[in-house]
Image: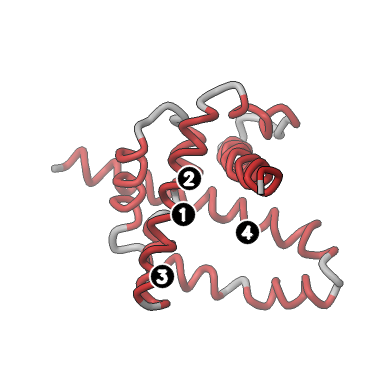
Amino acid sequence: LRTNEHVWRMREVDETGLAKEDVEREEIKNKGEIMDLLYYFDHGYMNVIKTEFIGDVYIFLWSLLLVIPGIIKSYEYRMVPFILAESPTMETREVLELSRNIMYGNKWQAFLLDMSFIPWHILGVVTLGIGEILYVNPYTNLTDACLYRKLKEIYTEKEAQA
């Protein structure tokens, strides 16, 4: 059980590290360094784990009600790794609330975007997972980073006008 717990923690921190790398790559800040993947082991490690865990628990609890509410909640908290990538010390409640606010009114578009990747995932399966590792996952991750940037920009403009 302890080994699984450590693997889960590393996965959560690594997910946020990948989000950081994708956001920076999307901004063309850098080409991505291997140390970007390990950045959060030194910067906000426990906050990243706590926030990702609480988000996962919320999604799980909503999924217990019915499948559809769980899917909706997963889209509400979709931007958590990207928010943590930019602000690793932000409070858990603030991160989850910001993700909900950014995704408000955009969950359907994000769902349709995910559906557009189905042929790519099928192609990844046909190539016995090699395609999934080499091009499908990086492509979908970078698309999510672009989606985050655009939705955050729209949200920031709305907040400035309010």
Which amino acid, mark 3?
Ser
Q: Which mark is residue 63?
A: 3
Mark 2 or mark 4, earlier in chain: 2
Which amino acid, mark 4?
Thr
Please give the name of the residue rendered at 35% of the width and 63% of the height, measured from the top-left corner: 106
Mark 3 or mark 4, earlier in chain: 3
Q: Position of residue 28 (x, y in %)?
A: 61, 35
Determine contact: label 1, label 3, CB under 8 Å.
no
Mark 4 or mark 1, earlier in chain: 1
Residue highlighted by disc 2? 52
Of the two numbered discs 2 and 4 in the rendering, the one whose residue sits closer to the viewer: 2
Q: Which mark is residue 56?
A: 1
Determine contact: label 2, label 1, CB under 8 Å.
yes
Please give the name of the residue rendered at 63% of the width and 76% of the height, measured from the top-left corner: 118
Which amino acid, mark 2?
Glu
Q: CA distance from mark 4 to mark 1?
A: 20 Å
Of the two numbered discs 3 and 4 in the rendering, the one whose residue sits closer to the viewer: 3
Residue highlighted by disc 4? 140
